[in-house]
Image (cartoon, helix red, strand yellow):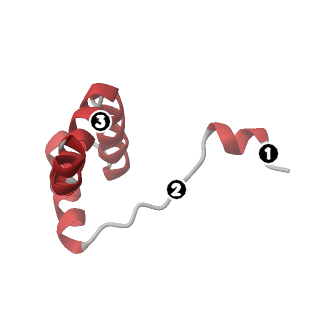
Amino acid sequence: MIPFWYLETMAMTLRLNDEEMAALKRQAETEHRSMQEVARLAILQRINGYSRADFIRENTELILERDAEALRLLAE
């Protein structure tokens, strides 16, 4: 059984390449925040700023490109 406290403050490992880690470190230093806080805020910004409409628009474009020939044949 998973303890309740674990579900409230779950930890995770974030794997970054050297370039991403350096960029995160620079951003944290610029903002006078910890790297963890910068990453957490970036995740929240992404979640709050990425709407379902954005998701549908991006995937529709992908499908139209990927399946253009099949859609053309279906339209005939």
Question: What separation in Å lies between label 1 and label 3 (alpha carbons)?
Answer: 34 Å
| Closest to the observer, 61 or 71 | 71
The residue to which callout 3 is attached is: 55
Q: Amino acid at mark 2?
A: Met
Q: Residues within 10 Å of mark 3 (few under 14, many from 20)?
A: few
Which mark is first along the chain, 2 or 1?
1
Looking at the image, which residue sits at the far bottom?
18
The residue to which callout 2 is attached is: 12
Q: Position of residue 14 (x, y in %)?
A: 41, 61
Q: Amino acid at mark 1?
A: Pro
Q: Looking at the image, which residue is at 21% across and 49% down? A: 62
Judging from the image, what secondary structure is the residue with disc 1 in? loop
| Closest to the observer, 11 or 66 | 66
Q: Along the horizontal axis of the image, is 15 left or right of 10?
A: left
Residue 50's image quarter? top left
Question: What separation in Å lies between label 1 and label 2 (alpha carbons)?
Answer: 16 Å
- Image height check: is 65 above or below 18? above
Q: Amino acid at mark 3?
A: Phe
The residue to which callout 1 is attached is: 3
Q: Position of residue 59 (x, y in %)?
A: 26, 43
Q: Is residue 28 visible?
A: no
Q: Looking at the image, which residue is at 17% across and 69% down? A: 19
